[in-house]
Amino acid sequence: MNWDDETTGDDEARIVGASAEGDDQAVEAALRPKDLSEFVGQEKVRQQLDLVLKAARQRGATADHVLLSGAPGLGKTTLSMIIAAEMNAPIRITSGPAIQHAGDLAAILSSLQEGEILFLDEIHRMSRPAEEMLYMAMEDFRVDVIVGKGPGATAIPLELPPFTLVGATTRAGLLPPPLRDRFGFTGHMEFYDPAELQRVIHRSAGLLDVEIDPVGAAEIAGRSRGTPRIANRLLRRVRDYAQVRADGVITREIAEAALSVYEVDGRGLDRLDRAVLEALLKLFGGGPVGLSTLAVAVGEERETVEEVAEPFLVREGLLARTPRGRVATPAAWAHLGLVPPQAAGPGAAGSGQQGLFGA
């Protein structure tokens, strides 16, 4: 994912990965807030959405179509379910990749009830023919179903009941302007700060019947990459450690010990992140170095390094992407406890490439 990109299989396997699969999805469903008053963080989006939904209820109308954008794990699916609960309406959930033909979308739209919420995840990955059908459905609540082929094909108009489309995307820039413009409300989900994540962790700990002290919650929050999904996953792993190797209470010491077992350090970096930084610093003197060369040094695929490891390293200010290649920042040297070449002594090079060739 540039960090707003789709997650890969490598990301799904990481404890600090932002995607959710298997058991994670079941646990998430149990921990999700049920209404806006329980939803933690995203203050501006929450307030704006509250006004939109209350106004629609007072008018007795369906809510405007809603577009939610932002990185995985920030609460887009949760907000879609809250919208359905606030509007007292059923919700239908599907995703862009599942709609490959206009007929797939027509089948879904024609079966909607009046006022129903249609949640379309990864809406930017929907096929172009389905996308064009969606324009008319959103604006006029009508679709044209094509019957037959060639010169004898006939378009049959099909009226739809009023509904609310909630689209979620990690890459809003890939949505064509005609589609973006048809959403009445657009909200961008930001990464959470540690204080907000502590509130998320305390709420989840209560639901999981886990005893946690404030300092322990702060320790987990600081390693959660600004993402509630990761915070909840780390909480469950620390809970397991506290249950097996301690008295079940999560303190700072227990959290530190548990997360060291899972190789998540104080800034939320895991084994892959540190491997990329160590290769960049120790083998290439901090760079610049090409992505392919860096991937070979780490023993990973180029796509894994670029889409899984780099986004968080860039966001944390530990790595920079430049036209000449990847470059480590002073913060990366400090995080790994290493001394930059220019500070190592007389004659040391400023970049790893110069140091290698003595220029």
Image (tube, rainbow, N blue to C red):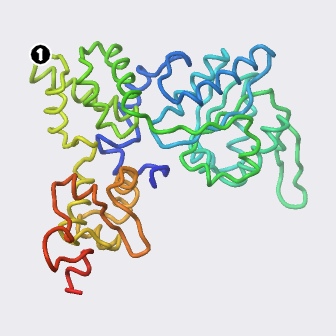
Q: Where is residue 269 shown, x and y percent of the image?
A: 27, 47
Residue in the picture at 38% in, 27% down: 195
Name the residue tied to disc 1: 247
Classify residue 241 as left or right of residue 115: left
Which of the two residues, 156 or 313, is positioned nearer the viewer here?
Answer: 313
Which of the two residues, 281 or 80, is positioned nearer the viewer here?
Answer: 281
Looking at the picture, does residue 264 appear above or below residue 118? below
Classify residue 296 as left or right of residue 80: left
Circle 1 Cα neighbour tier, 10 Å, few/some/many (<14 / 14–19 / ≥20): few
Q: Where is residue 89 shown, x and y percent of the image?
A: 67, 18
Which of the two residues, 120 or 204, is positioned nearer the viewer here?
Answer: 204
Which of the two residues, 355 or 264, is positioned nearer the viewer here?
Answer: 355
Q: Where is residue 13 shown, x and y percent of the image?
A: 31, 45
Residue in the picture at 46% in, 55% down: 2
Q: Where is residue 318 shown, x and y percent of the image?
A: 32, 56
The type of residue carrying mark 1 is Asp
